[in-house]
């Protein structure tokens, strides 16, 4: 992660953030729910939860995933209406989330303001503390670690994330692990399917979004050639796939493909990816510009 606000610490006072959205692109989609949990001395002292009325219709796929319908958000405030409340609740606290960069990108887009708060990502911690697990999604971890809240809604996910962070910290104590132990070693080799594109360096930072992830590209990219984009993710330790499979973790859509979605058109790859997501596969659909954000470009 290239964001200078990203950090890795063990703390007891913070705010947990989670959002539900109409899609995965902070450029094209909107927030439909915000959840916040304020933690002091490892205890929840306050919560915030609000449904948001988007400008666009909520897609049937999103409703199946979150349970949030167009009827539920009718009459709810807009994202700009809740900006002051949310910013006041967060204050200057550290922000913790699971895949935090996604939520912060949506907050930045919705509020037209980038938060200056330091933030941490429990997914990155979970990958280090529980390397034996195949998946590190919040829904998977809640089941494996017997975390109480598994509902795919913003406030419930905030509480789950807080409980996950507690478990991570306790595991670190039990195993006598410190932050520097978790991130002490660089790339040691991975199951990278090189195909015809090989890494240009043998030193790969494991603490990046794409490390060890199966990636599929579809459609024409506007900013660069697809081959160059593939080279970038292979250099980060990603595994390139030609088609969407059950192993696929991210489907990256060319900008033209994402524009087609706004007109109600979805490619076969996109439909197949949504099918796998609803079946519980650890897979996400990312637009081209969000992809560049994750690369720090």
Image: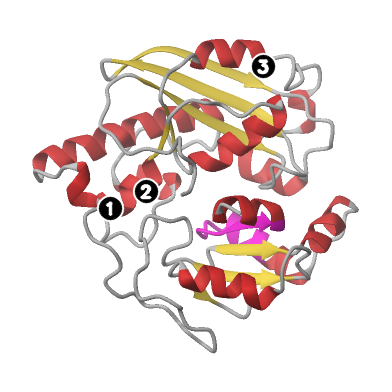
CB within 8 Å, label 3 to label 1: no
Q: Is residue 228 left or right of residue 41?
A: right
Residue 117 location in percent, x, y? 48, 25
- Residue carrying label 3: 83
Residue 111 location in percent, x, y? 69, 25
Q: Dot 3 lies on which element?
A: helix
Q: How many numbered badges does the structure rendering display?
A: 3
CB within 8 Å, label 3 to label 2: no
The magenta stretch is 273-288
Q: Is residue 73 left or right of residue 87?
A: right
3 and 285: which one is in front? 3
Q: What is the C-alpha distance between the residues marked 3 and 1?
A: 34 Å
293 and 138: which one is in front? 293
Neighbour class for label 2 at 10 Å: few (<14), some, many (≥20)?
A: some
Residue 156 location in percent, x, y? 48, 29
Q: Is residue 244 visible?
A: no
CB within 8 Å, label 2 to label 1: yes
Coloring applied to the structure: secondary structure
Q: What is the C-alpha distance between the residues marked 2 and 1?
A: 7 Å
Q: Dot 2 lies on which element?
A: helix
State whether residue 177 is above or below residue 242: above
Q: What is the C-alpha distance between the residues marked 3 and 2?
A: 28 Å
- Residue carrying label 2: 124
Which residue is painted at 83% across and 37% down in the image? Answer: 57
**If the image is split into quadrants, where does the C terminus sit?**
bottom right
Is residue 214 on the magenta stretch?
no
Which residue is painted at 27% across and 26% down in the image? Answer: 11
- Residue carrying label 1: 128
């Amino acid at each position: 992660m290239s964001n200078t606000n990203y950090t890795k610490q063990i703390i007891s006072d913070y705010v947990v953030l989670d959002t539900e959205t109409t899609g995965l692109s902070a450029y094209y989609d909107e927030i439909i729910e915000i959840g916040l949990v304020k933690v002091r001395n490892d205890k929840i002292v306050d919560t915030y939860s609000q449904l948001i009325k988007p400008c666009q219709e909520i897609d049937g796929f999103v409703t199946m995933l979150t349970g949030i319908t167009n009827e539920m958000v009718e009459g709810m405030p807009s994202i700009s209406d809740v900006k002051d409340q949310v910013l006041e609740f967060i204050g200057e606290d550290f922000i913790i989330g699971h895949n935090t960069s996604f939520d912060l990108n949506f907050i930045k887009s919705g509020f037209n303001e980038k938060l200056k708060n330091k933030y941490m990502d429990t997914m990155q911690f979970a990958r280090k503390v529980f390397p034996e697990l195949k998946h590190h999604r919040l829904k998977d971890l809640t089941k494996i670690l017997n975390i109480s809240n598994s509902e795919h809604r913003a406030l419930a996910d905030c509480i789950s994330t807080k409980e996950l962070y507690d478990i991570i910290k306790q595991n670190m104590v039990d195993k006598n692990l410190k932050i520097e132990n978790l991130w002490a070693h660089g790339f040691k080799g991975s199951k990278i399917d090189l195909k015809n594109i090989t890494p240009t360096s043998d030193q790969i930072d494991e603490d990046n979004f794409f490390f060890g992830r199966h990636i599929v590209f579809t459609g024409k990219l506007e900013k660069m050639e697809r081959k160059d984009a593939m080279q970038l993710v292979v250099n980060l330790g990603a595994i390139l796939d030609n088609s969407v499979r059950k192993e696929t973790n991210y489907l990256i859509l060319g900008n033209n493909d994402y524009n087609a979605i706004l007109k109600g058109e979805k490619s076969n790859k996109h439909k197949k990816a949504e099918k796998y997501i609803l079946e519980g596969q650890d897979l996400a659909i990312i637009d081209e510009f969000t992809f560049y954000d994750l690369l720090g470009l």
